[in-house]
Image (cartoon, rainbow, N blue to C red):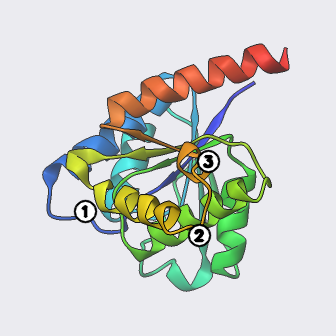
Amino acid sequence: MQHSVCVYCGSRPGHDEAFTRDAETLGRGLAEAGLRLVYGAGDVGLMGSVARAAQQAGGDTFGVIPAHLVAWEVGKTDLTRYIVTETMHERKKVMFMNSDSVAVLPGGAGSLDELFEVLTWRQLGLHEKPIFLVNTNGYWDPFMSLMNHVVDHGFADRTLLDYVTVVADADAALSALRRAFSLRNVVTE
């Protein structure tokens, strides 16, 4: 059974070249590990970098984009599977339902929206999919400070912090994904 990893990331490259390098490393590594990339179907920013790297390594790519973003995010139509949805909500649902885990590279408001949604769903017991934050050059440190702030002020239990695994870079994310999938295979067999 092929596992799929939903990757949330920026439609811009950001100011640190390490963000693009990690996107490329993650895309290539997913393909080399036989994991399907599920992502937002854009061909710009980190989205394009992760997808092109996966494709160049022979990987299976599954992209989902809402019609109103096809021009803006330059819908990448040469993917293994390319789906155009009517809304952002539908996009997020299709991406999540077609994945076994989530990896979050650096990104902006859209990536934060996607991350908070799957984190909330996990907190509510709606799924048990692993969520990995690829903390390239400490990008997600402020997010984790905010999560600790939320817990410290009594708006969530400490278990909230257990639902996200912070990894230093794409190589660490790939190792964590391999471990997560091998453990899940042992549990389900």
Amino acid type of the residue tagged 3 in the rendering? Thr
Q: Nearer the viewer, mark 2 or mark 1?
A: 2
Tell me residue 106's x, y (percent).
33, 57
* Residue denoted by label 3: 159
| Secondary structure state at the residue bearing disc 1 | loop
Q: Residues within 10 Å of mark 3 (few under 14, many from 20)?
A: few
Is 147 rendered above or below residue 163?
below
Tell me residue 130's x, y (percent).
61, 40
Is 142 rendered above or below residue 172?
below
Looking at the image, residue 40 sits to the left or right of residue 99; the answer is left
* Residue denoted by label 2: 155
Amino acid type of the residue tagged 1 in the rendering? Pro
| Secondary structure state at the residue bearing disc 2 | loop
Q: Are marks 2 and 1 in contact (CB under 8 Å)?
A: no
* Residue denoted by label 1: 13
Instruction: Say which residue appears at 64% left-offset and 38% top-offset.
Output: 4
